Image (spheres, grey):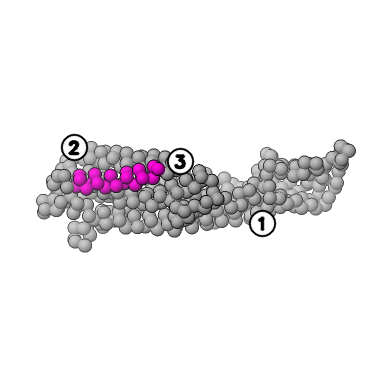
Amino acid sequence: MLIYQRYIVKNILPSLIIVIFSITSFVWITQILKLLYLIDKGINVVHFLNLVIWVLPSLLFMLLPFATMISVIYTYNYLSQRRQIIILQNLGLNNIQIANPALFVALLVTMFSYYISSTLLPLSYAKLKSDLNFLKNNYASDVLDAKILNVISKNITIYFNQRLPNGVMKGLVLFDNRKPDDQAILFAQFGSCKIYNNSFVFQLKEGVRQTHDHNGNLTYLSFGSLTIEVDNNSKLEQQKYNREINEYYIDELLRPDDQLSKQKRTKLIAEGHQRLIWPLYNFILVFLTLAIFLRQPYDKKSSLKQILITTVSAVIITYLHFSLQNLASKDLNFIFACYANAIIVIIVSIYLYFRKTI
């Protein structure tokens, strides 16, 4: 690598790290805020942090192209202000040669993005679901709210007045409608809840079971301790393993199971192509924005205009990509348009690089 190339790369890398950290942190915090209620429920802070850390790969996958583009434009604008880009141009370097260091960085980021897309994204999402299941198993009582009706399943609803410091529920009422001909209401002084084998298990103490017999007479059964296990109709069991798109690997997305519905298969295939196309935009956006930025001679008055035109161009390109991707998730014929959009941008960028030598 030539001296000027190393110099530009060394200027890009710090700004790239700062931009990635800033943008990702901001979006990551907004996602964390949605989960802060778990801490109020008594979730251990360490367990909470272990959970939210697995959100980062999906954020990086989506944000890296924008972070890379911003850091590159910031660096080249800084070099232009110091007249260093003009010096390189006066030495006889054309725009593509001047852009090479940034394109090298963009290529490295693209390769990392493909690693996220192919491996890290499904692994992290699977780990996220695993940690959520762990929290449900260990904090089942804590995630239930006092003084409201907590719908556990379509047949089980629970209400309690107070949660004691040890997680025990006090003043508990459980509505058990699992058997239409034997519906019951259970009152208990105390109760606790755990999850075993994806089923809620309620341990009730010092209570009464109230139901009607075959003649319609109200009957009572007192108990010192009673265990109730919610069967496979529970919400948790219904969601036992309904794989979400982010859990699939690319080869699984491109070749979905024939037993899935047509709509589901279409979405999976479209997502598979999204995993292949979007990492390319780490390179494409840098390639395009520098082609536009370097075409115009630097001027303090036109600097803002250059950045504005560059930014608007990138926004239009990404908007087209996501619009076409959305259409492809409903009709696979639009997948070709997704690839065509990327190819056209590259062709236009090459034209801009060589149309005019500054």
Which numbered circle lies on residue 261?
none
Pair 1/3: label in front: 3
Disc 1 designates what residue?
A: 197
Disc 3 designates what residue?
A: 330
Element class at badge 1:
loop
Residue 216 lies, in percent from the top left, at 86, 37
Element class at badge 2:
helix
N-terminal-most mark, 1 or 2: 1
Few, some or many residues within 10 Å of mark 2 (<14, 14–19, 20+): few
Magenta segment's dominant SS is helix
Tag 1: residue type? Asn
Who is closer to the viewer here, 90 or 197?
197
Tag 2: residue type? Lys
Disc 2 designates what residue?
A: 301
Furthest toward the front, the residue is 258
Residue 17 occupies quadrant: bottom left
N-terminal-most mark, 3 or 2: 2
Q: Residue at (38%, 52%) from the top-left corner?
A: 276
Q: Is residue 339 left or right of residue 193?
A: left
Element class at badge 3:
loop
Q: Give the position of the N terminus as an image quadrant.
A: bottom left
Q: Residue at (77%, 44%) from the top-left corner?
A: 179
The CA span between labels 1 and 2 is 67 Å
Few, some or many residues within 10 Å of mark 3 (<14, 14–19, 20+): some
The CA span between labels 3 and 2 is 46 Å
Instruction: Report the magenta residues as a range.
Output: 333-353
